Structure formats: C-alpha cells, structure tokens
Amino acid sequence: MIRLALLLMTLLWAGPASADEFRPAYLQLVQKDATRFDVLWKVPALDEDTRLKLQPVFPPDAKAIGVRRSAYIGGTSVDRWTIEAPGGLIDKAIEFDGFQTARTDILVRLERTDGTEQLERLSPSNPVFRVSSSPGPWEVLVSYTRLGFEHILGGIDHLLFVASLVMLIGSGKRLLVAITTFTLAHSITLALATLGVLNVPSPPVEATIALSIVFVCLEILRMRDPGYESLATRRPWLIAFSFGLLHGLGFAGALAEVGLPQNSIPLALLAFNVGVELGQLAFVGVLLAAGAVLSRVFRVQDSRLARTVPAYAIGSLANLWFLERLLAFSTG
C-alpha cells in the first residue's frame, strides 16, 4: 500500500512536469556602509521582456542612487542597483509589490559589514522582511536549518529518489541505513562544493540526478522477476551512498544561491544539512504513515501491480526531466 501512496503523490506532483525546485524570487542586500546597500533582485522570467511582476518596496526614505542595471540570464531577470537609507535599515520593513498574486516565495538575504547575515524565506502569508540587528549563532542555526528543510521539501526530484528507495527497500532497518548513508554522502559533496573544493557544472548534475531516479525505478521493476538479485537489492545502502554524492552537488547549487555567512560558515553548513535530513525523515514518515492508513482503509496487501504502476509513473516523470535538462544544457 506504500506503493499506492507513492503513486498518488507522483500524480499530484506531475502537473508542473518540472523539477526546478529552487526558483523563488531572490533579494540580496549587501551593506557597504551605515546607509548604503547594493541591491540584487532576481525573479523568474520567460524572456527579456516577460518577467514576474514582483518588485521590492523599500522604506520611503530609502532612495536609489546610481544606475540600475538589468539583464536576462537563463530564465531569470536580474537587476542591480544601490540604495541609500538615512539612518540605515535596522527595524525597517521591506515589502513586495505584487506578492499576493505572484504564486512564488521570496528568499531575502542581508549581508552586513560585520560579516553577519540575515536570511529569511517569505511567502504570501509572511510577506514582510524586517531588518534586524546582527544575529547570534542561534539565529544562524535556525535560519539555515529552516532553509535546508524547506529546500528538500520543495525538491521534487530529490524526494522522488528517496521515495523510490522506500519502494525498493520497504521499511525497517535496511531503509534506515540507506537513508542515513544517503544523508552522509550528500553532506560530503555539499560541503566540498560549497567550500569550493569541488566545482561541477550544474546542468549535467541535474540531468544525472534525474537518471538516478530512473535507475532505481528500473531496479524496482526488475524485482518482479523471480529470483532477481543485483547490487541495488543486496546492498541498497551502497546505491544510496553513491547517488547521494551526486544529489549533494544538486543541493550545493541551491545553497550557492544564498551563500554562507562568512563568520559562521561551519555552523550554517551544518544547519543546512540538519534541515535537509529533518525534511527527508519527515517525508519518509509521512509516506510510511500514508501507506499504513491506506492499507487499513482498503484492506489489501501490496501486489505486483501496486509496485509496477508507481515505478512506471515515477520513472516516466524522471525520464521527462532528464530529457528537458539534457536539451537545456546541450542547446546552451
């Protein structure tokens, strides 16, 4: 019945037909001195003339100075300019025009001259960014844990890989070991890529992540054959670890979008990983609970069809993502 729960989730997710999981609007403020801030504003866009109608609204006394520069880069409209705010921005609010109808979240990052940062993800239900004074370690821990948690729950392809592992392994100790090794692996490559030790282009990584889902789904389908055994069925933890190294590079792309506070890099990196792990465990818990509930409601056991249909659905969706991503980076 876990397979039925997976199928229902897959059909709900299949609507957008895309796994571009980390596309909120993004506002970055870099403090230059007590009153001046460099502004970077990024919103999703179809082309140079068609962009999301969403704009930050600074306090009334904040004025733009210098030239505002605009560019279109890979599905994103990017604006850069400088503002001057008499008295600074502490305890002042930044709002967003068009937020209620934009159907997206906004990630806001403020980098102060003392090296500290303020990071928040806004939604239509929480639409205002209020500038605070320099945060302590607790604020960094909370902010980056929340960021990791929200990222994994918005990362459909990463979650479908975890869901495929659940289908391949079932529940129990083997699943716990596989999820733990998956976390360990993506934590390693996430740290290496974020710190600049590894530098792998994002497009081929994202395409290969889609292929990792296809691989696990193929293993699920092959399990229908009597007596079938493979490395994936004998040692699923090894498959989880191998592909976890790959998925960590994908997480690094998300973290690179917001950066790390220069005076708290280890803490922020640890917190982001903790948030990702909590999100994964929450997802697996919901999945197993949904399977248990559906099993009681329908009073049926897992069958070959219950295993096959979700595997085909997830694998087909992952194949579509692979082709989309392959076409995206092969055509430039």
Image (tube, helix red, strand yellow):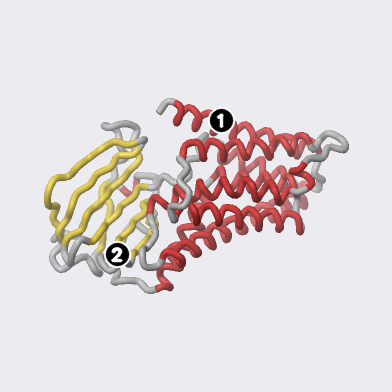
Check disc 2 and give the amino acid type.
Arg
Check disc 1 and give the amino acid type.
Leu
Marks 1 and 2, the one that precedes in the sequence: 2
The residue indicated by pointer 1 is 320
**Residue 105, disc:** none
Q: Position of residue 68 (x, y in %)?
A: 17, 45
Q: Position of residue 212 (x, y in %)?
A: 62, 39
- 19 over 94 or under it: above or below: above
Report whether 211 appears left or right of 170: left
Report whether 330 appears left or right of 181: left
Q: Residue at x 53, y 60 (%)?
A: 273
Q: Position of residue 239 (x, y in %)?
A: 68, 46
Q: Residue at x 17, y 55 (%)?
A: 83
Residue 97 visible from this viewpoint: no
Q: Position of residue 303 (x, y in %)?
A: 81, 40
The residue indicated by pointer 2 is 130
Q: Quarter-wise, where is residue 77 in the image?
A: top left
